[in-house]
């Protein structure tokens, strides 16, 4: 029969080789033996793979399978050589690198000197197989063993993001990964990965108490550091787990207050009050109501609060509650009642700059110019640059002397000071319409003595969305003090934002920088000018310096992100925008949408070849210590 088959093959012109000479047949036979599990013959398969290697010495597949068989036969030392050779023959073969990495981990258990080689192989393998949970787990452990803290952090964060569902040593692998990430991030003072890890640990419906404690500590740190956007998110997550804890809702309110989100703060305070009313809660509720223009409600709150406050409460709360009550009465145009309150609080009120400033305003409104002048003269000695006394300091001192007439310049100065002080008072509570009205009345009394009044008026107009009027006021201020750096920066930035003369904007901001070269706000404006001019490299350098000088400015981070996008560095742009989102600012929701879109775009850009390039760059400084 064999002779007949051979004859037929020759007649058809088909080559007929014995299985011992055909690498393909040998590979199939060896793979079959290798895959038989417990009934398999790894050593027999190894013999066949060696024969394939004799026939095809450059077969990466044969070297890889040979190494697998030797490892299955409990001979990791012999398996190392063919495993390494497989990666040399096929440097982009993910399976080969993964096998080599795991093999090196096994060898390192008895030979710690092999740890660097294990890390090298695992770094390559994880870049080529970024979704492989086991590889990232082993890499995290190996990096910890080699004291490569930064790479260990990277490995645990990546593993956590994969959301592995398996258990290891009785613990969810995902939780273990995030715990390790939080540990290393804290040790390395890396804020972003620490936040990500803690938020992930605390997100499950039944998060462990220790994770909630980590979240609470994080939230308090974020609030202290001014990361109000992130602090609010952390406290809100804590509130989901502990909805009956009034202190959490009060903390949410405090964060929102600092971010000028008064309606949100009031909502949180109401929730806290339904659980447990406290004097502090009432105080902050009144403050919110004032900023929302609900003055009568705030006044009622404050009157009740001042009746119930005990000596155990902080004295600062008692003092400020008095100031706010007097302000409520004054804001509803009841000057005599405000004055009676302030006098009734003497002698404490006599040493309070804000109350004395309001008392001055009351005297002017009641047309009592002589006592108002006396209060101003004494206040200039006692309170220096606080409140209305700071506004009066640039005025000639003789205007307020007893021998000076109360007519003419003195009268106009006193009346204008009252309107300026009232405007500043409204600005404090962000009541811009009322602020603007007071400033306009001040200007009718007399021409502005300095550009401070004009700068406040321009800001009020800008806050009301009237940027053309704001620019007009700044132009007027230019004629009074053309070299004022704040004016130059504000006008220059307004020109940039509203497509004005870019050359003039650049000139103004450069002039401001010459006077104050380390002003972070002005550097941010200059970086934005360079961006608009298409000078992206220079813009990046300038904005990075601005970010160093003013690290908590979301505006600077936003601008830097835009520059990096233009430079084609999307990942770095994303990092800057995410830093901006740590803070609270009016356009935060808009930036969140842009961040989401950018993340999607970056995800679509990643390809296998990109992963390989990343791996090559990541490993270029690694020492090649591999040995058979």
Image (cartoon, grey):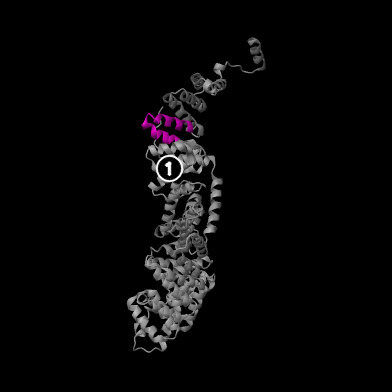
Where residue 181 sits, quadrant-wise, is: top left
Spot occupied by residue 246 in the image (x, y as percentages of width and height): 47, 58
Residue 406 position, x and y percent, is 39, 88
Name the residue tied to disc 1: 180
Image coords of residue 273 (percent x, y): 49, 62
- Up-down: is 566 above or below 154? below
> In terms of secondary structure, where does tag 1 sit?
helix
Near-viewer residue (436 or 356): 356
- Magenta stretch: residue 176 in it? no
Query: Can residue 405 be spotted in the picture?
Result: yes
- Classify mark 1: residues with Cα within 10 Å, few (<14), some (14-19) or many (20+): many
Judged left or right of residue 16, residue 61 is left
| Relative image position of residue 580 (x, y in whole percent) | 47, 57
Residue 55 in view: no
Q: Nearer the viewer, residue 421 or 218?
A: 218
Q: Nearer the viewer, residue 620 or 218?
A: 218
Majority secondary structure in the magenta region? helix
Quadrant for the N terminus in the image: top right
Where does the magenta region start and end? Answer: 98-122
């Amino acid at each position: 029969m064999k002779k007949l088959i051979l004859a037929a093959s020759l007649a058809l012109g088909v080559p007929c080789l014995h299985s011992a000479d055909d690498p393909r047949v040998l590979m199939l036979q060896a793979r079959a033996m290798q895959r038989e599990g417990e009934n398999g013959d790894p050593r027999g398969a190894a013999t066949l793979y060696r024969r394939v290697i004799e026939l095809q010495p450059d077969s990466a597949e044969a070297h890889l399978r040979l190494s697998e068989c030797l490892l299955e036969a409990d001979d990791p030392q012999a398996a190392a050589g063919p495993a390494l050779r497989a990666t040399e023959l096929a440097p982009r073969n993910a399976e080969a690198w993964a096998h080599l990495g795991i093999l090196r981990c096994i060898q390192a258990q008895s030979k710690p000197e092999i740890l660097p080689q294990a890390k090298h192989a695992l770094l390559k393998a994880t870049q080529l197989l970024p979704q492989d949970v086991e590889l990232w787990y082993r890499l995290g452990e190996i990096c910890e063993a080699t004291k490569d803290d930064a790479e260990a952090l990277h490995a645990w964060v990546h593993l956590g993001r994969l959301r592995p569902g398996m258990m290891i040593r009785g613990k969810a692998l995902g939780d273990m990964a995030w715990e390790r990430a939080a540990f290393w991030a804290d040790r390395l003072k890396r804020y972003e990965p620490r936040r990500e890890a803690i938020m992930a640990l605390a997100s499950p419906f039944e998060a462990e108490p220790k994770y909630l404690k980590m979240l609470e500590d994080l939230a308090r740190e974020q609030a202290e550091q001014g990361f109000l956007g992130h602090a609010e998110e952390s406290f809100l997550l804590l509130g989901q787990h502990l909805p009956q804890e009034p202190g959490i809702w009060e903390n949410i309110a405090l964060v929102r207050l600092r971010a000028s989100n008064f309606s949100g703060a009031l909502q949180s305070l109401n929730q806290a009050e339904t659980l447990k009313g406290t004097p502090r809660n009432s105080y902050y509720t009144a403050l919110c109501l004032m900023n929302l223009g609900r003055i009568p409600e705030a006044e009622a709150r404050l009157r009740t609060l001042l009746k119930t406050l005990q000596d155990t409460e902080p004295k600062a709360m008692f003092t400020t509650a008095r100031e706010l009550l007097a302000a409520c009465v004054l804001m509803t145009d009841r000057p005599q009642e405000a004055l009676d309150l302030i006098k009734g609080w003497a002698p404490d009120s006599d040493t309070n700059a804000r109350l004395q400033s309001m008392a001055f305003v009351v005297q002017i409104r009641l047309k009592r110019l002589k006592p108002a002048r006396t209060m101003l003269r004494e206040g200039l000695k006692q309170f220096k640059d606080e409140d209305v006394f700071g506004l009066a300091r640039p005025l000639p001192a003789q205007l307020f002397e007893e021998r000076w007439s109360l007519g003419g310049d003195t009268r106009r100065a006193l009346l204008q000071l009252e309107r300026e002080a009232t405007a500043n008072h409204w600005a404090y509570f962000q009541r811009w319409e009322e602020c603007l009205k007071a400033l306009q009345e001040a200007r009718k009394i007399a021409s502005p003595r300095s550009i401070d009044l004009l700068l406040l008026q321009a800001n009020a107009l800008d806050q009301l969305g009237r940027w053309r009027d704001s620019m007009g006021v700044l132009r007027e201020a230019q004629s009074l003090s053309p070299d004022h750096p704040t004016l130059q920066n504000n006008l220059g930035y307004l020109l940039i934002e509203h497509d004005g003369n870019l050359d003039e904007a650049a000139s103004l901001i450069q002039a401001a920088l010459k006077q104050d070269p380390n002003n972070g706000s002005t550097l941010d404006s200059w970086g934005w000018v360079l961006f608009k001019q298409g000078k992206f490299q220079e813009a990046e350098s300038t904005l990075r310096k601005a970010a160093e000088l003013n690290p908590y400015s979301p505006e600077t981070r936003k601008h830097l992100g835009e520059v990096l996008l233009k430079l084609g560095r999307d990942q770095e742009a994303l990092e800057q925008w995410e830093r901006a989102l740590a803070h609270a600012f009016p356009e935060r929701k808009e930036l969140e949408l842009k961040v989401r879109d950018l993340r999607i775009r970056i995800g679509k850009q990643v390809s296998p070849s990109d992963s390989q390039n990343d791996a090559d760059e990541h490993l270029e400084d690694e020492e090649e210590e591999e040995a058979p």
